[in-house]
Image (cartoon, rainbow, N blue to C red):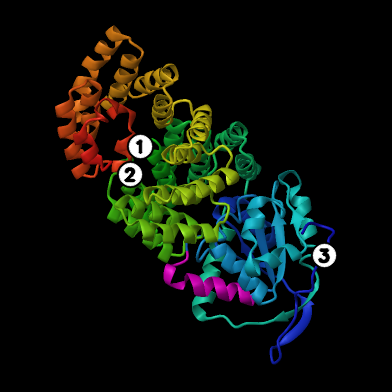
Amino acid sequence: MGEGQTNTPVNHHNQGEVMTARIEKTVFISYRRTNFWTALAVFQNLYANGYDVFFDYKSIPSGDFEQVITENVKSRAHFIVILSPSALERCNEPGDWLRREIETAIENKRNIIPLMMEGFKFGSSTTVKALTGKLAELKKYNAMGIPVEYFEEAMGKLRGDRFLNKPLESVFHPVSNVTTQITEEQKSAASEAPPVEKEQLTAQEWFERGYVFNEDKNYDEAIRCYTEAIGLKPNEIYLAAIYSNRGGARKDKGDLDGAISDLDEATRLNPDFVEGYNNRGVVRQMKKEFVGAIEDFNKAILLKPDYAMAYTNRGNARRAIGDLQGAIEDHTLSIELKNPELYLPLSNRGNALYEKGDLDVAIIDLNKAINLKPDFAMAYNNRGTVHFAKDDLENAIADYDKAIANKPDFTEAYLGRGTARYKKNDLDEAIADLSQAIRLKPDLTDAYITRGAIFSLKRDNLNALFDFQTASKLEPGDGTIRASLVRVLKNLGLKRESKEQEQIARVLIQKEKEYNQACFEAICENVDRALELLKIGLEKKQVEKEWAQQDPDLESIRDDPRFKELVGE
C-alpha cells in the first residue's frame, strides 16, 4: 500500500500486559543485505535525531542470532522494513529471516512502516508471489518512498506525526541480558560507521533498476544498470552481489562466458558467497561442464548445508554424468529441505527415476509436480516421455498437448508428440509436429532423423534426402545417420554418392550398437550379416520388435523368413 491509503489499525494490547499511550522512539530496522547502505543511512539519520535504533550492523553470533533478533522486534515500538524490488524475492525460502522478522512484527502488533526504494511496487509479480500467508498483511500498512535525491526530506517525513512521532499503545516485552549486551554492541558499531555517501545509495538504486529490467527480460538494460552500479565502487560484499546479478543477466541473454567471468569475480570478492557458487554452477551446467558445476554446488552446500536449490541443481548435474542414484539422493534432500519451488526437485527426481528405469515411480513424482504447479510445461513433457516409454501413446500425446498448451514454443514437446504420432502411424500429423520443432530449433538433429524416416516410409525420397543430409551435417560422426543417407541415395539411384557415403558410414558404424549395424548391413544388402546382428540387437533389447517391423532401414530383408521369425511377424 502506498502513501495516501488508509492505514489498518495495528496497535493493540493483550489482556494483562502493561500498556501506555505515548510517543515512542525505539525502532527496529529490517532489511536485505543488498540494501545495506539504505538501512545504514536510515539508522544514522534516526540515531542522530535521538532514536534508539536496532540495526543488524555486524555479524551476531549464530547461537544468539534468533534470540537477539526476536527480542528486539518484540521490544521496540516501531518496525521499519526496507523494501526494494529485490528485497522480498527469497521470502518463500524456508527460514528466511526477513520474512520471519516481518511476521514477528505483525504478530506483536508493532507500528510497521514499509520504506519503499525506487522501483518497488506491491503489485509486481515478485512481490505478489512473496506476500503469502501472514506476510500478505504487509501491504495493509502505510508505506512511504525514500528517493535518493530527496532522502533528507523523506527522513523528515518519516520522523513526523504520520509515521514515528505519534502516540502508541505500546506493549513492553522484557529482553534478556544477552540481547541487551549484543544490542548495545550493534548500536555502538553502527554509530561509528562513516556517513553514507550519496554514491553508495546511488549504486544501490542502479542495482535495483537492473533487477527490475532483468525481471522484465530486458537484459541489455539490466546489464547496463549493473555496470553503472559497479562503476560507483561500493564495498566488496555488495559489489559481489552486483557482479552476480550481472552474470545472471548475461546468462539469460545467452552470454555464458561473460556470465562465468562475472561470477568468478563475485566469488573472488566474497569467498563465502553461497548464491555466487550456485549461480556459477548453473552456468557451467549450461556449458555442459558438469564436473565443474558439481564442484560449485559442493561449495555452496558446504557453506549452507540446508540450501535446497543447490541440492537439486547438483542432482541435475549428477544425472547428466550418469550418476542417477546420486541425482535421486540430491533431489530427495532438496524435497526434505522443503525447497520453496518443490515441484522442481519432484520433477527432476522423476526424470532420474525414468532414466533408471523406474517408470511407475517416475510418474508418481511427475504427478506430484504437476499437482503443485498445474501450468508446469516441463513436467507434462517429461511425463509424456515416460508414458511413451511405457508404450502408452494416448497418454503420451495428451501430456505433450498440455505441455504445448502451457508453452506454445516448447520445441521438445513438439518433437515428443511427433515421435509418438509416428509410432502411432499418424504420419502426416507427425510430420507437422516435427516440422514445427525444426522451425523453433533449426539444429534439432533428432527431428530431422525422425522426419526423414517418415518421408522414407511415405516413399518421399527427395524430402528424406534433405533431412538425412541436414542431420549428417549436424552430426558428422553419427554412423546411423550416414547409413540412412546411404539408403535414400540408393533409392534415388545416385550410385556414386551412395558409395562415397557407404565408405564413410562403414567406419563410423563400428562404434554403434548391433541393431544399428544390422540396419547398415541391410542397406548394403549383406543379408546374412544383417540378420546375425539383428538377432543380437533384439536379444539385448536395443529396440522393440515393433519398431524393427517398420524400420525403413531394414526394408531389404523384410521378406526373408528369418527376419519374420526374429521380429515375430
Visible in this render: residue 49? no
- Left/right placement of residue 304 relative to residue 171 reads left
Is residue 387 depicted above or below 543 in this figure? below
Secondary structure of the residue carrying tag 1 is: loop
First in sequence: mark 1 or mark 2?
1
Residue 131 in the image: state x and y as whole percent.
Answer: 65, 61
Magenta residues? 60-75
Observer-nearest residue: 77 or 366? 366
Residue ID at (38%, 18%): 469
First in sequence: mark 3 or mark 1?
3
CB-based contact (under 8 Å), mark 1 and mark 2: yes
Residue 305, image quadrant: bottom left
Q: Which residue is mark 3?
A: 162
Q: Which residue is mark 1?
A: 288
Identify the residue at the far bottom of this view: 16
Is residue 209 depicted above or below 557 in this figure? below
Residue 262 in the image: state x and y as whole percent.
Answer: 46, 36
| Image quadrant containing the N terminus | bottom right
Secondary structure of the residue carrying tag 3 is: loop
Observer-nearest residue: 73 or 263? 263
Residue ID at (61%, 38%): 217
